Amino acid sequence: MERRTGTVSRGIRCPIIREGDDLPKIVCDSITEAANIDGFELHDKDVVAITESIVARSQGNYAETDAIAADVKAKLGGETIGVIFPILSRNRFAICLRGIAKGAKKIILMLSYPSDEVGNHLLTYDQLDEAGVNPYGDVLSLEKYRELFGENKHEFTGVDYVEYYESLIREEGADCEIIFANQPSSILRYTDTVLTCDIHTRARTKRLLKAAGAKIVLGLDDILTSSVNGSGFNAEFGLLGSNKSTESAVKLFPKDCGEFVRKTQKLLVEATGKQIEVMVYGDGAFKDPQGKIWELADPCVSPAYTDGLRGTPNELKLKYLADNDYADLKGEALKSAISEKIREKDGSLVGNMVSEGTTPRRYTDLIGSLCDLTSGSGDKGTPIVLVQGYFDNYTN
């Protein structure tokens, strides 16, 4: 009988992960037990994805604000530091900011407006239009911001992040001045020592600041790239991808993930006899249409994956074939013609009209986004996701 199911994504429950747990074995056992209990089969080219959070937890990859402070002070001098373009997040940035403030005498906090890099809004464009403010050139002081716009609380959290971030800095003993600007060089009117906190635009920001004459330019990816007094660290991403753990500590993005996915794949192949691919995933790469927030606050969707997940889709658009090449066919004849076209496809379809509208994104970004939506970020208790049939097409 012909199979009628395409891609299936299953959240897999596992024990609560603690530091030192043998995570590859736990993942393998959780997958095989779920298959036995729930009665599904495992296949070649299935994908097992593990959220970055439990990988980092098993590694014990945590850091206290004191470690952040020590690294910031050593690398940026401990005097006046310009902290620019942070995202507005209690989970993602607030505890990092506490550590940064501990490592400085004064913070010049420069916030982008009307929103941060991932779409958390301080203001609306309508407010800017009504006030006659040009976000591409105008630099606003805190006083001017309050005069024009008053208090603005985040739509979902109810937090006034301007007030919140200022209070965090002062609680850690640093002086604070807040400005609003979108040109990186604007901070150089106040200090030539800069820590840029943007995620996906950080390389450009660093380049522009150095070209404009900044003395010291670092990013969050340059802080905690090695252990400080026994802390966790991430050699590639530093503080990027970190999350709040406690009021004085962050969980860092996991390290050495390549070794982890290879070991996990080996165990799965040995246990199932199937060539199962493995990846670590964090935030998905998608945007919320209501809140306008782009989910991807991690530096990448997947920090590591097995070789079978490299590449991008090379797909035909079925509706284009049905409406154009085979407009005169229907039923079994249409199915056969399209199936044969799929079997015949060869080489890259980039630029070919028959692939127009398909998604030219990396497999890991697409699958990771699916997994993020499947596992959620709350109490589902499924930090492992099994994706089956993703590499199937209409002929399978």
Image: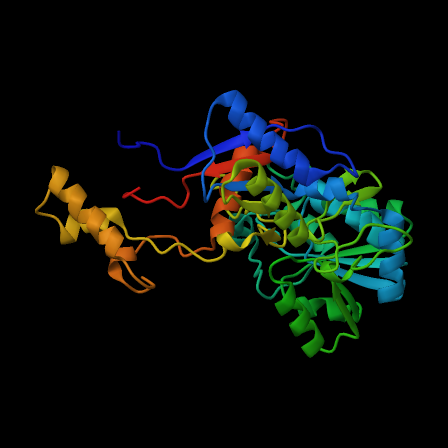
Tell me how the rendering is colored: rainbow
Q: Quadrant of residue 34?
A: top right
Q: Is residue 231 left or right of residue 4?
A: right
Up/down of 188 relative to 53, above or below: below
Image quadrant holding the N terminus, namely top left
Residue 157 visible: no
* Nearer to me, 65 or 312: 312
Q: What residue do we see at 68% from left, 50% from top?
A: 241
| Number of residue marks | 0
Q: Is residue 232 left or right of residue 254?
A: right
Residue 67 lies, in percent from the top left, at 87, 52
Up/down of 239 relative to 191, above or below: above
Q: Is residue 34 left or right of residue 162?
A: left
Spot the residue most to the left.
328
Residue 347 visible: yes
Residue 195 lies, in percent from the top left, at 76, 62
Residue 344 lies, in percent from the top left, at 24, 56
Image quadrant holding the C terminus, namely top left
Q: What residue do we see at 45% from left, 42% from top?
A: 44
* Nearer to me, 44 or 386: 44
Residue 214 lies, in percent from the top left, at 75, 74
Q: Quadrant of residue 59?
A: top right
* Nearer to me, 358 or 212: 358
